[in-house]
Amino acid sequence: MKFIDIARIHIAAGDGGVGCVSFRREKFIPKGGPDGGNGGRGGSVVIRANRHLATLLDFQYKRNYQAPRGEHGLGSNKTGRSGEDVTLEVPAGTVIREAATGTILADLLGDGDETVAAAGGRGGKGNAAFATATNQAPRQFEQGEEGEERDLELELKLLADVGLVGFPNAGKSTLISVVSAARPKIADYPFTTLVPNLGIVRVDEGQSFVVADIPGILQGAHLGKGLGIQFLRHIERSKVLAFLIDCTREDPGEDYRTLLNELKLFKKELLKKPRIAVFTKTDLLDAGGLKALSKLRFGTTPVLRISAVTGAGISALVRAMWDKVRPVAARRKRGT
């Protein structure tokens, strides 16, 4: 399935039905009173989150959505039928914005969360609603209100507990394939990962968390270099960030600092998230290289050394991720 995380659509709710002008006509009552009913309400456009969806692909093929109008009022005080609502389903984690202004209308985080993105117009009143003691045969009626119409931007931000951050070919895809059932494309060249991948990591019985592997970051990514900010937004919702650094690079410590700086320039709030530094591919180092690597420290940030090929350090990494995720999740659940 093709991964699409940005879509623009046009939505229009239905207009309300027109109120009816009618007078009661019954046998032996030649001049009955007004009995024109009200018009029905127009259908609304509702957007609902569905956890079973993972892409906005459908909105690439269909961009215009119109809810039906309400039916006109009828005689005998019959209200016109309201238009059916149109419900659009999007992946959980979708942000809905006004396309012109960028104003956020809704952020649908949980399965089943929904918002009325365009409200249907109210039906117009029929002449029966205008009858008074001094105006017993009104011919007044109302047109229905127009339904709301909007151009929207839908933006999907993945919901993951741990976001894997690193340069291309740092071993993110290999790691997620080892610790979860996800099977991303893996090869020994940059930008193998062209779309985000999600994997569920099971710690113990009833304990698990979600890891997101996003395409590699380059220096200058915040300006759009490489795959740029196209995928940086997918780590915004992550509770914990794991920085994966290829230990065979010339200066792994500098790579870590460069990644931190790119996140800071993109959105400095990302640096407030709990994080872990993970040196990958340790199976490729000799004894001297491993000794030098063991001396690298980044303040209070936990530093782990792993090999996804041999499995060295993987269990410790999974436990370290879980130890970081659990308190953050608990605070969010308490609303603190």
Image (cartoon, rainbow, N blue to C red):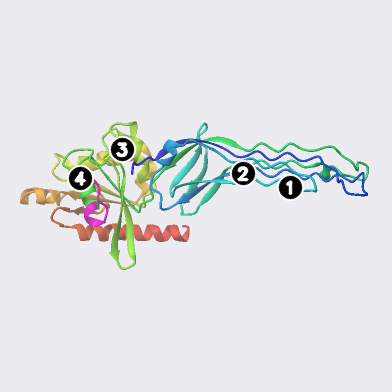
Q: Is residue 318 above or below residue 218?
A: below
Q: CA distance from mark 1 to mark 2?
A: 15 Å
Side of 235 relative to 247 (left or right): right
Magenta span? 177-186
Q: SS class of the residue under badge 2?
A: loop
Name the residue rendered at 50%, 38% in the picture: 97
Q: Position of residue 287 (x, y in %)?
A: 6, 51
Q: Amino acid at mark 4?
A: Ile
Badge 4 is on which residue? 186
Q: Earlier in the sequence, mark 3 or mark 1?
A: 1
Q: Earlier in the sequence, mark 3 or mark 4?
A: 4
Name the residue rendered at 31%, 44% in the picture: 196
Question: Hey, which quadrant is residue 130 in on the image?
Answer: top right
Label 1 Cα neighbours within 10 Å, binned few <14 / some 14-19 / many ≥20: many
Side of 28 relative to 268 (left or right): right
Which of 79/300 is in front?
A: 79
Q: CA distance from mark 2 to mark 4?
A: 47 Å
Badge 2 is on which residue? 43
Q: Is residue 329 above or below residue 148?
A: below
Q: Amino acid at mark 1?
A: Thr
Q: In what quadrant of the picture does the N terminus appear? A: top left
Label 3 Cα neighbours within 10 Å, binned few <14 / some 14-19 / many ≥20: some
